[in-house]
Image (tube, rainbow, N blue to C red):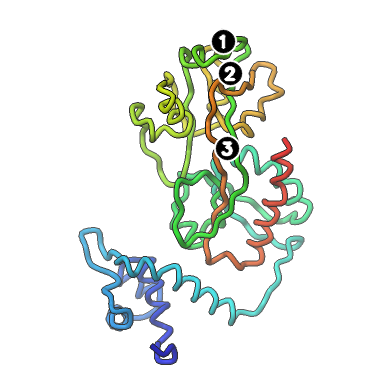
Amino acid sequence: MNIARVDLNLLVYLDVLLRERNVTRAAEQLGITQPALSNGLRRLRKLFGDPLLVRTNEGMTPTERALELRPQICDALYSLEKAIQPKTPFDPLTSHKVFRIMASDYAESTLIPLILPPLRRQAPHITLDILTPSDVSFQDVEQGRVDMAINRFDSLPQSFHHTSLWQDGFSCVLSKRHPIVDVFTLENYLAAQHIWASKTGMGVGVGVNPEDVQQLGWVDETLSKLGHKRTISVYTRHYQVAMLLSGQNDLIATLPSKLANLQRDNPALAVLPPPFDIPAIQLSMAWSSLLHNNSGHQWLRQLIKSVIPRLSSH
């Protein structure tokens, strides 16, 4: 099909329809009448030879073809919009921009303290708004309402850009008065009480099922493969809380090492290697294709990546 014969407004209609999944809301956002958008949807279906959006009990549901098209449509529209906009270079020294970053408290505790000094020097008026994984959905990032997400992800939408920031092992944090601190064997580890901490992915979490080993994550999956299971007394989604509770004389927190090492100088706590091997985890940064070529966003991504070697050396 010749692109010259395609009404490019239809691609804008499809982008908004796939985002809103509601003809009335999409028409309001586009500033056109509902009949006009319904006519546009008919033309889109003819153009792509597919229903694109099907009415179900949950509302308008995209077809597989529509989901395949969406990242391509987003990229094409962003490229067109970028092409017709005047180029305005980003100046960190004068910018008053607010960058919204979703980060687990693992990422927040380890990374943000390293970002702040160069940020304050290079961009004294910029503000960081740090959101928790439960505050944010993938849709918030995809639509650019949140600049980036920094966390451990089991999976990411295909349309996202992402990069690995670092890999991390695990360490155990426990009170120096814990009965097994000087004899930290696997047998004693298994006989002790433990704190579980994790917040992978995004969105509102659900309760943990202690019997679902795969849901519990790396530490417990590894133990299960070895034929063992630890006794967990406390489940938390906050790593800092886990470290605080590890000051109890009978509890052990097994945490990512870069976070655990923040307690190296704490006279009340010991930081020890686990008495078994746990596969490394990966922390990633993800962002929307809508912001990929934004000069301010590019600057912040580069700033974040520039401090990673300092964290690795720690």
Rendered image: mark on residue 89: none
SS of the residue at dot 3? helix
Of the two numbered discs 3 and 1 in the rendering, the one whose residue sits closer to the viewer: 1
* Label 3 CA crowd tier, 10 Å (few <14, some 14–19, many 20+): many
Q: Earlier in the sequence, mark 2 or mark 3?
A: 3
Q: Where 85 falls versus 267 (above or below)? A: below
Residue identified by numbered label 2:
174
For the residues marked 2 and 3, what is the alpha-carbon distance in whole angstroms?
18 Å
SS of the residue at dot 1? loop
* Label 2 CA crowd tier, 10 Å (few <14, some 14–19, many 20+): many
Q: Do the numbered discs 1 and 2 sit on residues whose CB atoms are within 8 Å?
A: yes
Callout 3, which amino acid? Answer: Tyr
Q: How many marks?
A: 3
* Quarter occupied by residue 292: bottom right
Rendered image: mark on residue 180: 1
For the residues marked 3 and 1, what is the alpha-carbon distance in whole angstroms?
26 Å
Callout 2, which amino acid? Answer: Leu
Residue occupying the far left of the picture: 57
| Residue at image coords 57%, 25% | 243
Residue identified by numbered label 3:
106
* Quarter occupied by residue 211: top left
Callout 1, which amino acid? Answer: Ile
Q: Where 5 falls versus 70 (above or below)? A: below
Horizontal side of 197 relative to 301 (left or right) equals left
The x and y percentages for residue 67 are 36, 66
| Residue at image coords 45%, 60% | 158
Horizontal side of 178 relative to 226 (left or right) equals right
For the residues marked 1 and 2, what is the alpha-carbon distance in whole angstroms?
9 Å
The x and y percentages for residue 57 are 20, 59
| Residue at image coords 75%, 54% | 124
Residue in front for this viewpoint, 280 or 251: 280
| Residue at image coords 66%, 43% | 112
